[in-house]
Amino acid sequence: MTKRIKTQSALTGVTRRDFLMVSAATAATLAAARALLPSGAYAGTAAPEVTGAKLGFIALTDAAPLMIAKEKGLFEKFGMPDVEVLKQASWGATRDNLMLGGEANGIDGAHILTPMPYLMHTGKVTQNNQPMPMAIVARLNYDCQGISVAKEYAATGVGLDASKLKEAFAAKKAEGKEVKAAMTFPGGTHDLWLRYWLAAGGIDPDKDVSTIVVPPPQMVANMKVGNMDVFCVGEPWNEQLVHQGVGFTAATTGELWKGHPEKALGLRAAFIEKNPNATKAILMAVMAAQQWCEAKENKDEMAAIIGKRQWMNVPTPDIIGRLKGDINYGNGRVANGTDLYMKFWKDGVSYPFKSHDSWFLAENIRWGKFAPTTDINALVDQVNREDLWREAAKDLGVAASDIPASSSRGVETFFDGKIFDPANPSAYLDSLKIKASA
């Protein structure tokens, strides 16, 4: 890390030669950071109110934009050299530290499951149901989560069609044993992918299995000792499971919903209100990192960086395959060069479509996390700050073709033929056979 000169008083006792050396080193660092961006992308913005912020992350491949922004000096480039990117033990810990806030030894924002800011904003998952005003300012990635199954179920031939597990699960329950389906946080993305997949196969996630919460980095170890029958989690944990011969991937989430939103960059609303320029600087750094992560030529370096001990502490082979779209499902099926790789930028990935947030809220109504009378549009308007993304994109010099014209991506179609029209969530919910209220 290059030495940073904060004030004139800091130069006391420093020779002109020392000063020139430090200045040259700093300039070289910033030049290298600027090289990550398209030519002429950055013209400068108002100075941030603070030089730092505390951002949390979970050890998952989709936290890469935060890791890369830190490793490549992008926070520093946009005037926030003191940003800390702090590992969280679980999504519950992320929530608790967001409740505290950075000024109280917590965090100001985080790489986060897209529904979590809504669940926190409304007090659904907080202590004493205390609402914590939150905002989603960007999406971090699309696709590349996985639903993996213990190897004892390999003979069922289960894949995208979960119904092949129905008989096996029923038989296990008849023996007096519990069927456990693990996800990472109630109402979070992995909970919803798992529930959607099971329900599409005629398996009621509230009646036919027991859902349990397990932090992402602990999934493989828990399946290894038989603590669950199936789990849904992000990478690199599904690929690691396969490499260790513990289980296999039945389906990737991109097969359930092609080009689906996954993690978001969430910030405390109070931080945004107090530090609007710093918020924009954070956004610009993360967006620049997303562009870097998207480039195919950077995938190998990216895997090596995020696999480091301070980030994920995972061998590169457990990361790189699915990052590139090469999927060894672990049950004899291998698919190379697929378009199911993790997306970070192209086709509007970074932009937080309001229509996507509407689907997550509809699904959480489906499973009883929100009341059926919830005004989805009003709640999305409270939490989704796509306007801040657009401002940052403008200052960053993002190409017009990379800025969506509308806050809705329109009608979405799922693998089982179900259709979600963000203009009519009720019709979608009415079309679903298995739900909490049924």
Image (cartoon, helix red, strand yellow):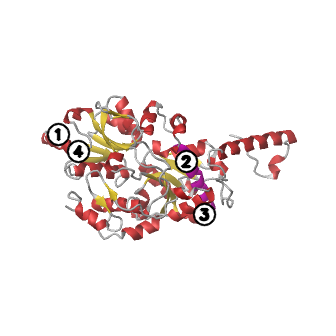
Local crowd at mark 3 within 10 Å, few (<14), some, or many (≥20)? some
* Residue 168: mark: 1
Q: From what the image shows, is residue 422 above or below residue 232?
A: below
Q: From what the image shows, is residue 248 above or below residue 361?
A: above
Q: Amino acid at mark 3?
A: Pro
Q: Is residue 284 magenta?
A: yes
Disc 2 and disc 4: Cα gap in Å?
35 Å
Q: From what the image shows, is residue 25 above or below residue 347?
A: above
Quadrant in the rendering for residue 330: top left
* Residue 380: mark: none
- Closest to the observer, 186 or 74: 74
Q: Earlier in the sequence, mark 3 or mark 2?
A: 3
Horizontal placement of 273 versus 433: left or right? right
Dot 2 corresponds to which residue?
291
Q: Amino acid at mark 4?
A: Ala
Q: Earlier in the sequence, mark 4 or mark 3?
A: 4
The kind of secondary structure element at disc 1 is helix
Q: Are marks 2 and 4 in contact (CB under 8 Å)?
A: no
What's drawn in magenta, residue-wise? 276-293
The C terminus - image quarter? bottom left
Disc 1 and disc 3: Cα gap in Å?
54 Å
Q: Earlier in the sequence, mark 1 or mark 3?
A: 1
Q: Are marks 3 and 2 in contact (CB under 8 Å)?
A: no
- Closest to the observer, 100 or 172: 172
Disc 2 and disc 1: Cα gap in Å?
44 Å
Say which residue appears at 75% left-offset and 51% top-offset: 6
Local crowd at mark 4 within 10 Å, few (<14), some, or many (≥20)? many
The kind of secondary structure element at disc 2 is helix
Say which residue appears at 19% left-offset and 41% top-offset: 164
Q: Position of residue 425 (x, y in %)?
A: 31, 66
Dot 3 corresponds to which residue?
276
Q: Amino acid at mark 2?
A: Gln
